[in-house]
Image (cartoon, rainbow, N blue to C red):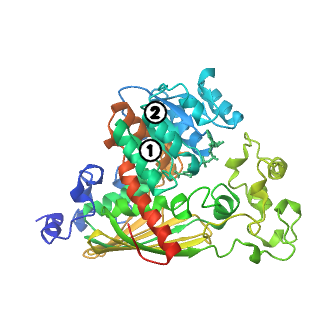
Amino acid sequence: MERRDFLKSCGFALGAGAALGGPLAPVAGAAERIFAPADQAGPAPGDYNSIPVRGLKPDVPRQVSVIIIGAGNRGNVYAAYAEKFPGAMKIVGVSDILDYRTKRLSDKHGVAPEMRFGHFREVFASGKKLADAVVIATPDDRHYEPCMKALELGYDVLLEKPVAQTEKECKAILRQAKKYGRIVGVCHVLRYAPYFLAMKEVVDSGVLGQIVSIQHLEAIRYAHMAHSYVRGNWRDSNETTPIILAKSCHDLDILRWIIGKPCKSIVADGNLFFFKKENAPEGAPMYCTDGCPHADKCPYNAITIYTKLKQHLGVFDLEGNRDPEFILSRLKDPRYSNYARCVFHCDNNQPDHYVADMMFDGGVSVSFAMSAFVSHGSRRTRIMGTMGFLDGDLTQFTVWDYLTRTPKVWNRKVSDIPEYRGSGHGGGDLALARDFVEAVAWQDPGRLSSSIDVSLESHMMGFAAERSRRSGKKEKV
Ligand SMILES: NC(=O)c1ccc[n+]([C@@H]2O[C@H](COP(=O)([O-])OP(=O)(O)OC[C@H]3O[C@@H](n4cnc5c(N)ncnc54)[C@H](O)[C@@H]3O)[C@@H](O)[C@H]2O)c1
């Protein structure tokens, strides 16, 4: 009897999601590889590296036309797919309230003058559908309105996360998508990253037996926290969304996806511990550019982070000029000077550490933690099963099978796959673009793993977590 059959007969091999079919079903051939007898398995490390990684080239019957709404960081990320595969995706319109951003992206893609828009409302003003799809990559508080309007006019939509700012709006978008029969893909890009796809395949193969519990750490990295959630666009949870959605909706989504069962309840806690006025060292000015006496001792110093370490420069519209003096001039320019603020003197309210315990259907428990105070941005996942244990750190994961007691590793370097070079989120960004383009070209939402339906579930987990953090009570999802 094959080992997999044996495990199945014991009721052990019901990998999460395996019974659900569709995108959650195990990939053919994986089980044979994973369950190969030890004497035929070859060297243990690298054993899981044979899990196939799909290339970025799409399988499409026709070219898909797209309007980018929000030509900032994310809008440019998805537009880059059209540069790689122009036969599959064409950018025919661009909208941004900043003229130079509309112009820059439009020029790159040869967008016609009449398809260069300012505010997103201009895109919809004619009441006509001008392309197959829109990418909505505006700030969090500007997702709902353009998405509702785009669906009404018959566009398919690639929608940045978080879907919207409230549960009510999220549900309304789902209803609108159903009403007009349109595709909405949510940019939960981690689902498309080879690392998480391999992890999901291992879980679904049944090698871990039944999943009983998961520990998951989202390590934001101290300077990333300062950049985005203290000084930057997501510092105010009321203007955007609470950090559990603004940042960690990816993690909630991955947990829901890996487990393959709904979350039933959640209890959360966390607060803003460090980045507040009372922690400012004496004499620290409002802006790091005003000559802070603590500059050399402060790892959050803006001049160090941006001009010396040259991190997070995407927000400064540098047009390729990374000269320290030029970056410094940007920090002093009122358009960008939020990024020069002292981290103890910002109008921020996002927690810098967050914990949440969750119970999933069937009694699976998850312990989630997010922290800003980590040297490297990472995600650490430990999956504890009845037959095996998986431990991953976003670059590699190791699986211990309790019967063979031999560790096996997945450690492929996505950056070594030429096609994936430059695709952020471990390759997930452009792989999502590929699947979205295919879904639109074939009019087949099943080609997308992060449809609005499934994405809404993990958003509801985020809203419940935030209710619990504020009330101190366990919340039903
Ligand atoms: N999927 C991910 O991993 C991921 C990562 C980062 C950000 N995001 C999300 O993507 C969205 C965009 O983030 P970003 O980093 O690209 O921000 P960004 O500030 O770089 O880009 C947003 C752009 O939208 C434009 N804009 C604002 N209001 C507009 C309007 N009314 N009409 C047209 N354009 C308008 C801005 O001028 C800006 O250029 C946010 O919701 C964010 O939470 C997702």
Q: Nearer the viewer, residue 129 or 436?
A: 129
Residue at figure coordinates x 62%, y 57% from the top left = 234
- Tell me the quadrant of the picture where the C terminus can be found: bottom left
Residue 193 visible in the shown view:
no
Mark 1 or 2: in front is 2
- Residue 283 picture location, percent across and down: 87, 73
Relative to 326, residue 203 above or below: below
Residue 259 visible in the shown view:
yes
Which residue in the protein does label 1 denote? 431
Q: Is residue 282 left or right of residue 40?
A: right
Q: Nearer the viewer, residue 339 or 25?
A: 339
- Tell me the quadrant of the picture where the N terminus can be found: bottom left
Q: Is residue 316 left or right of residue 430?
A: right
- Residue 450 picture location, percent across and down: 39, 49
- Residue 88, quarter of picture: top left
Determine the secondary structure under disc 2: strand
Which residue in the protein does label 2 denote? 133
